[in-house]
Amino acid sequence: AQKITQTQPGMFVQEKEAVTLDCTYDTSDPSYGLFWYKQPSSGEMIFLIYQGSYDQQNATEGRYSLNFQKARKSANLVISASQLGDSAMYFCAMRDAQLTGGFKTIFGAGTRLFVKA
Amino acid sequence: GAVVSQHPSWVICKSGTSVKIECRSLDFQATTMFWYRQFPKQSLMLMATSNEGSKATYEQGVEKDKFLINHASLTLSTLTVTSAHPEDSSFYICSVTKAVQSYEQYFGPGTRLTVT
């Protein structure tokens, strides 16, 4: 069964430092996608980064990188050089195929990141 | 620019009334749209998958007679909350995908529903 776990309800980081947000997952489908989204207080979901299950390299997008450890079923988000504007809720999500033929995305509980000046 | 729009962005309705929320794909034809709800300070919960031209697939525990979904065209899906109650107050978010096999998913800005 699909499962996404984010064990850190809240994290603090000093401005300009790096921070890692944890995410573990479980699925029986060999083909899946892992996502990280940022949700500021405005509520919009902002796509940050994507990692495919067959991708050999860790995904990177600017200051965001995904530490993909397939054997451990973890997909941690690393934000380098934190900025005050990074303060937000961060969700890890996984999308995989369903027996019905469609795809389904589930979200973790989220981690609220606070960046301190 | 925005790929997905939702209307209205916020709505207040009285208990017992129905409210319709629209989700539009602006840039491409979306064969599949998803509806999520998010309670304050909680994660997104998938309510249903909406496929153009066919009935929506509801997640376990979601009342299909209460949350009516109509995917009338490749660019429009609507969610109607019927006989709304205060416990239906939530943030409703839709998302679209370009193709059935695509992992790309674009989210709308959300609709905040308050039932008084």
Image (spheres, rainbow, N blue to C red):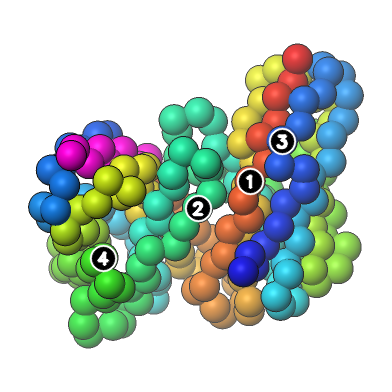
Q: Are marks 1 and 3 in contact (CB under 8 Å)?
A: no
Label 2: which secondary element: loop
Q: CA distance from mark 1 to mark 3?
A: 8 Å
Q: CA distance from mark 3 to mark 2?
A: 16 Å
**What predominant SS class does the magenta segment belong to?**
strand
Q: Residue at x 16, y 58 (%)?
A: A81
Q: Are marks 2 and 1 in contact (CB under 8 Å)?
A: yes
The residue singled out by tag 1 in the image is: B110
Q: Is residue A41 left or right of residue B73?
A: left
Subunit bearing disc 1:
B
Q: Is residue B77 left or right of residue A28?
A: right
Q: Amino acid at mark 4?
A: Tyr
Q: In which quarter of the view is residue B3 placed? A: bottom right
Q: Which residues are magenta?
A: A109-117
Label 1: which secondary element: loop
- Are the residues flagged by discs 3 and 4 from a single subunit? no
Q: Are marks 3 and 2 in contact (CB under 8 Å)?
A: no
The residue singled out by tag 3 in the image is: B10
